[in-house]
Each structure stands twice: as structure tokens, then as C-alpha cells.
Amino acid sequence: MRGTHTIDLRRDTITLPDDAMREEAFKAPLGDSVYGEDPSQEELERFAAALLGKEEAIFIPSGTMGNLVALLSHTSRGDEVILEENAHIRTSETGGAACVGGLMLRGVRGDDGAPEPQLVEAAIRSDNIHYPRTSLICLESSHYRYGGIVPPLETFGRLRDIADRSGLPVHLDGARLFNAALALGVESREIAGYADSVMFCISKGLGAPVGSLLCGSRAFIARARRYRKMLGGGMRQTGWLCACGLRALSPENIASLERDHQNARLLAKGLEKRREFDLSPERVQTNYVVTRLCDDRFDGPTFVKLLAARNVLATASGKEVVRFVTSKQVSRADIEEVLTRIGSLLDEGP
């Protein structure tokens, strides 16, 4: 049995601007943003900074660039950055910290998505000419590699205390910060409060076509502007993009992410009923469902390929692990259809 329409669960970056966002975009005035003359970018940056309780913010083309700009702004060449061993900055940003920043990344274990505080404290270098200088601690929420889980704020608090005692800044990769805040039932600024700088994306589940914001102190953002320009991120007439960003950050749009979470939980409950999947429902905290395939007939890539033939798109994360990501492009009815098509595949076999 093959469904007739394609349901894409590979990523939430497929989220498209809604009609209201498109309408706002093309009404926006334009100006040269590098000279501080684009009114929508100026408004978006002020709004983002206030939303997270920071002094200033800067609009940047992508989350990867935003994280790299943050690292460059906090550190010097030859320094070392401590972060969780599977952090996106360490595993999935093309080695930019090393190649561009001349930085060492020291990964430590963190089963709940945050680096274990005791291990972080032990990893901070003493002042010795033989060692690189520890200059930054990085956090991530929600955590991409661990299936969108949200680290406990208690852990962030312990890490903040360690950073303060050691005189170190903290940067938060908050690409999906608003998913994390909804999962915890807190305001985004509460999570952001544990970090000196925060990057978040407006181009994933929030639906803007392009862009991320980097927030921090006035002095930090002044350094970040220079590095953004160096990396080619100084765009010109950004008004249309930033108008989308303002719409993306509206309270009703942020709240709508909860539907993605509900759909992920619905999918997880359906998969849990099948003996062919091994997953922990308690780890489905946002819009990710990550499951181990327990069926000798399939490995992950084969299962994903056969599922694609039934017009369901997912991602194989290694030999046995399959990942599904919900978004606004996927409805509750779509999730129910996905479960039907997966059941058909498993019952019929390859």
C-alpha cells in the first residue's frame, strides 16, 4: 500500500512562511542594513534582544554562522572551548571553530544534553604555558543530536555557577530555543538567562525563510558585528527577511510550535506499539522522534528507502537509528497516515 501524497519528516527546516508572513514581508520598507538603515532589521534586533532579556541582538544569515560569530567574539586563537561531546557546534558545523577561529573544542559527556557539570569543572585548564586557555563554555537547547531533548535548567544553573567561579562566559546554541521553552513551560528568556550570548533560529519550525539572531551584551554585539562582516554576513536590503522574522517571533506563532510537539508524541506512541521499534517516549520532548529499529529484515537506510517508496520521508541516523521531525507542514492527519504506511511496510515486509 502506497500513500498518494508525500509526508516529509526529515527536518523542520521545510517549514514555509504562512500567508500572513508573506504579506508582512512584501509590505516592509527596505534600507542598507550594513549602515543600520533597514528599519525592519533594526526593529527585529531590538525585539529579539528584549525578548531574551539581553542588551542587543544582531541578525545573521544562519545558525551556523551565528554560533561561529559567537565563538570568535568570546575567544582568541589557540583557546579551548568546553561543550557537550555531541553538541552541534562540535559535530555538525564543518569544523569552523578550528578552521576559522583556531580554536580547540573539548567535548565532555552529557547524557541529558548538557555537559556534565563535574566534568566541565575538571576540564577547565589551569593557568599554564603548556595548555590552551579555557575561554568559553557552550550549551545547547534543545539538543539536536539527542533527538530534541531539553536539558534541565538545574543543570544549566550548576554550569552557570561553575562559569562564574572560573570567570568564563557561556554561549547557548538555542537554534530551537522556543521549542525548548515550550517543553519546559518557561519563557525563552529564562533559559537565555543562563548564558552570556544566545543564538536562535527563525528559519526552522518558526517558518521564516532565512535567518538567526545572536543576542548578548552591547560590547559583545559590537565585536560580533565585525566578525559577521568578516564572514560575509553583512547583507544589504534585509527588510523582507526581517519582517518575516518579526512575524515568526509573534506570540501566536511561537505557541503554534506546541502542535509540532503534540504530533511528535502521537507518532512516538504509535511507534511504541510496534515491537520493531525501541524508543523512550519520555525523551520525545519537542518535535523529534528518534527510534532504534529492532527488525532483522531492515537496517536504518533500507527502512528509510522503503518508507520513501511509500511517500514518507525520514532520516537514517546510523545503521539502526531512524529519526522523524515534525513541523507545521505536517498535520495530525498526516501523522496518522504515516503510522498506517509504516504498519503496512512492516506487515508486508521488504
Image (spheres, rainbow, N blue to C red):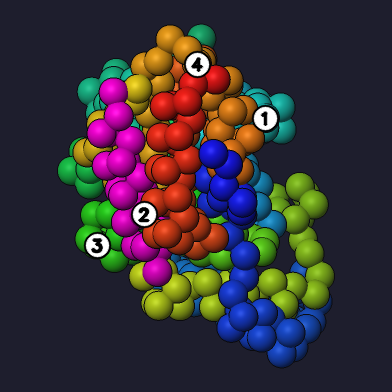
Residue 33 is drawn in which quadrant? bottom right
Rendering quarter of residue 93: top right
Residue 154 versus residue 247: which sits nearer the camera?
Answer: 247
Identity, as a three-letter code, of the amino acid under mark 3? Val
Q: Quadrant of residue 314?
A: top right
Looking at the rendered structure, the kind of residue marked 2 is Asn
Earlier residue among tags 4 and 3: 3
Secondary element at tag 4: loop
Asked whether residue 346 appears in the rendered view, the answer is: yes
**Residue 148, position in %: x, y?**
39, 42
Amino acid type, residue under disc 1 in the picture: Thr
Horizontal and vertical percent position of residue 73? 59, 46
Q: Secondary structure at mark 2?
A: helix
Secondary structure found at label 1? loop
Residue 272 falls left or right of residue 169: left
User: Relative to residue 272, is residue 142 depicted above or below?
Assistant: below
Evaluate whether residue 8 shows in this view.
no
Q: Are marks 2 and 3 in contact (CB under 8 Å)?
A: no
Whether residues under marks 1 and 3 lie with C-beta atoms below 8 angstroms apart, the answer is no
Q: Position of residue 269 (x, y in %)?
A: 27, 42
Labelled disc at residue 94: 1
Which residue was labeled with disc 4?
A: 298
Q: Which residue lies under the disc numbered 2?
A: 263
The label nearer to you, 4 versus 3, is: 4
Instruction: Give whichever of discs 1 and 3 has the lower sequence position.
Output: 1
Report the Cα–Cα distance between label 4 and label 3.
40 Å
Please name the residue that numbered disc 3 is placed on: 186
Q: Residue furthest left?
A: 154
Residue at image coords 65%, 52%: 62
